[in-house]
Image: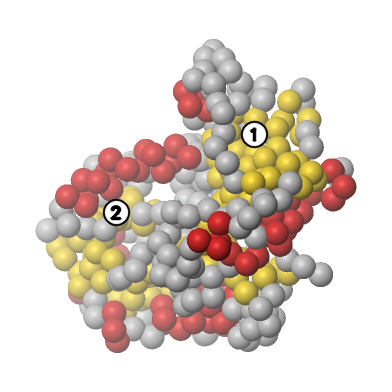
Amino acid sequence: MIAAADFNITRVERSKLNEMTLENIPFGKYFTDHMLEVDFEDGEWKTVEIKPYQPLLLSPSLAALHYGQAIFEGIKAYKNQLGEAQIFRPFENFKRFNISAERMQMPQIPEEIFMEGMRLLVELDQNWIPQQEDHSLYIRPFMFSSDELIGVRPSDKYKFMIILSPTGPYYSAPMRIYVEEKYVRAVPGGVGYAKAAGNYGGAMFATAQAKKKGYDQVLWTDAYEHKYVQECGTMNVFFIIGDRAITPDIESGTILAGVTRDTTITLLREMGFKVEERPISIDDIVDAYNAGILYEVFGTGTAATISMIKELRYKDFVMNFDVDKWQTAPAIKKAMTDIKEGKVEDVHGWMTRVSS
Ligand code: COI
C-alpha cells in the first residue's frame, strides 16, 4: 500500500494563475500549475510525483501511440459556499477506471494513488477552481502503455497521470442531434463500456459527417439493427415519456456507466419519476413524439453535465422541442449544481472534501 509519504511533491515557483483569469474560460484548454505522474515498471507502481505541469518526453516507438492501450476519466471539483474545495463522486470514477484498465489489459491502479493523488493535486491547485456559473475544475486521470516497442502485445510499462483544467461549459446551447444509422460506436463484446481513448477517436468521423449536415452530435444506435439507441455524442441519454424517464440500460456492455447518468437516475426517482433502464428503440421514441408524450430529451455526462436536445433527426423525420418550456432537465441540473456547490445538504454523500 502506498501511503501519503510516498508522494513526492515539487511546487512551482510562481503560479500561472497570476497571468490569467478564470472567467468565461473554454472547456479543456488551460491547465493548472501541477500534474501527477507515476510509472508502472517491473510489476509495480513507483513513487508518485506531483510536479510542475510540463511536456512529456516520449519515444516515437511508445506502444500507446501505435496500439492504443490508453484510458481516461473525467471528474469535477467545485468550491462550496464556504470556499472549500470538493470533488464530485470521485470513487465512482476510480472504480470505473479499473474496469477500463482490465478490459484494455492494463494494470490496476491502487486506490491510494488514484484517490489520494487526486486529493493532493486538487488541494495544491485549489485556487484554480472557478466559481462562475457552469464552471468547475475538470480532473483528467489517464493511463497509457509506455513500452518502447512496436511488437503487438500488452506493454510491460505504463504511465498514470492526472492533469487539471479550469473549465467552462462543454456545450453552451441546446443541441441538434442526428440519429446515426451507418457508423457504430460499440458492439456487444467490444469496449463500449470502457473509457478507452479509441472509443472517442473512433467516433470522430461519424460526428464530423453529422456536423457537416448541421448537427452537433450523433445519437448512436446498435450495430445489428440500428434500432436501439445507445449514447449521444460523449453523453448518456434520457427520454422523458409521459410520467417515465427512460435511459438505455448498460447490460449489453455497449454503454459507458456514466456517473452523471447514475446521479440523474437517483434525482429523477426522488422527483417522482418512474425510471426505466432498458433497451429503447428509435421507433418507440418517434411514436412517443407523434403521440405528444415525448416531453424532454437530454444528455448527461461529467463534462456536459445536463445538455438539452432541441432537435432530433431520424432519417427524414425531424423532432423539435421547445426547450424553454421544459421543467425536468433544468430541475435535475439545478439539483445537481446545488449539491456540487454546497447550496443544499449533500444527503447522498456525493461530495469528497479535499482538505480535512
Ligand atoms: C466527460 O464527460 O468527462 C468525458 O469524458 C467526455 C469528453 C470530454 C471526452
Image position of 184 with respect to 296: above or below: above
Q: Position of residue 350 (x, y in %)?
A: 67, 71
Q: Residue furthest left?
A: 316
Residue type pointed to by label 2: Val
The numbered mark, 2 or 1, whose residue comes first in the sequence reads 1
Give the position of the C terminus as an image quadrant.
bottom right
Q: Mark 2 or mark 1: which is in front?
A: 1
How many labels, in total?
2
What residue is shown with label 1? 159
Instruction: Name the residue tied to disc 2.
Output: 218
Q: Is residue 178 visible?
A: yes
Q: Amino acid at mark 1?
A: Lys
In the image, residue 87 sits, relative to residue 190, either above or below, namely below
Q: Secondary structure at mark 1?
A: strand
Residue at (67% x, 70% y) in the render: 85
Mark pair 2, 1: CA separation: 32 Å
Please tell me which residue is depicted at 41% across the width and 81% down the height of the picture.
330
Quarter occupied by the N terminus: top right
Answer yes or no: disc 1 within 8 Å of ligand 1. Answer: no
Q: Are marks 2 and 1 in contact (CB under 8 Å)?
A: no
Q: In the image shown, does 237 or 173 lie closer to the viewer?
A: 173
